Amino acid sequence: MTGGATESRDQESPVPRASLAVALAVLAAAIGAGCASSREARPFDGQRAYELVAQQLEFGPRIPGSDGSRRAGEWIQQELKEAGWEIKIQSFNYHGIELRNFIGMAGPADDPPVVLGAHYDTRPKADQDPSDPAAPVPGANDGGSGVAVLLELAAAMPPDTLPRAVWMVFFDAEDSGGIEGWDWILGSSHLVETLEAEIESAVVVDMVGDADLRLPLELNSTGTLQQEIWLTAQTLGYSAFVAEPGPSILDDHTPFLRAGIPAVDIIDFEYPPWHTQADTLDKVSPASLEQVGRTLQTWLSRQP
């Protein structure tokens, strides 16, 4: 996860309160619709998402171009395939290394899709680590949590239950900036630069699994879209989504914003193990993953 400040906007008014019953009814309707389909929708499972984080750590560091990255990419494709999502692989070259974005596509084909994005790479060097800054970052939360949320969402929301078109995009090479001449957010930048389809909006999830989860309003995100999501979390009673101004972050939502596409970054940047070797599985909480996953599931289940 990157950490530079970028251009900011005036913060909008706090998210208003609404009835919990409204959001639950939306999710229940989506699940009910799934009962009539070949695959049933089900609530997002935080424990399963936690296990998906653990699986990524078994691949080792997912540094761009590494064996760990290759294995993670194959696994992401398999998970999407088993969930019934169409898969597109976007390959490109940077500094002589082949990079790959993975796109899971589902829902009405003629609709502009909502993009849910997360980076699957990990930082090559733990440059914030006090003891060994040259070692790679394990990437349990910074990389692993976002991927786990997207894959569990894909499994919980079968394609024929979606009321709108959705792309689950797994970005490569987000987190190598400043190391050996590499830039940040390479995968998301390449995706946006090569877009041939209209995109409705983009929501990036990054560093969303830590046990002490606190998700303030990232200052560069599109305010109206951000408030929709935070309101959904509020109606579900999820305290991790805090209607207070947070930092300005350079992250995978930035290329979408630069292209005029509404975009939001869901991120807890107050994470002490950031870019250290301490970013390990014991820092990740199933309950935190579930708050984020069920919020997005309810939000996605609304009719367009």
Image (cartoon, helix red, strand yellow):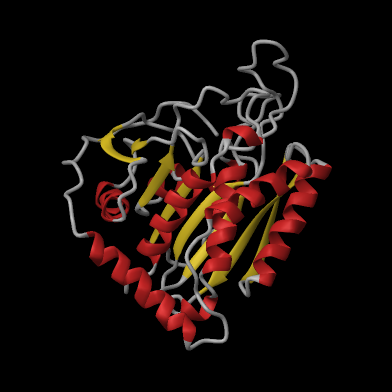
Toward the right, the furthest residue is 67
Give the answer, above or below, for where 62 lies relative to 248.
below
Q: Residue 205 appears at what percent x and percent y?
A: 48, 46
Residue pictured at 41% horizontal, 43% vertical: 265
Task: Give 231 or 177, whichever is nearer the viewer.
Answer: 231
User: Which quadrant would residue 241 be assigned to in this image?
Assistant: top left
| 86 in relation to 74, above or below | below
What x and y, as percent, mark residue 135? Answer: 75, 22
Give me the residue at 37% from left, 40% from top.
240
Is residue 146 in view from this perspective?
Answer: yes
Quadrant of image for the N terminus: top right
Q: Residue at x 75, y 36 (%)?
A: 61
Q: Residue at x 35, y 62 (%)?
A: 299
Q: Is residue 109 visible?
A: no
The quarter of the picture where the C terminus appears is: bottom left
Between 62 and 46, the residue placed more toward the observer is 46
> Where in the figure is residue 15, as x and y percent of width and height?
20, 46
Q: Position of residue 219 (x, y in %)?
A: 31, 35
Judged left or right of residue 282, residue 124 is: right
Residue closest to the eye, 272 or 267: 272
Residue 15 versus residue 300 in the image, above or below? above
Say whether residue 142 is left or right of residue 111: right
Give the tally of numbered discs. Answer: 0
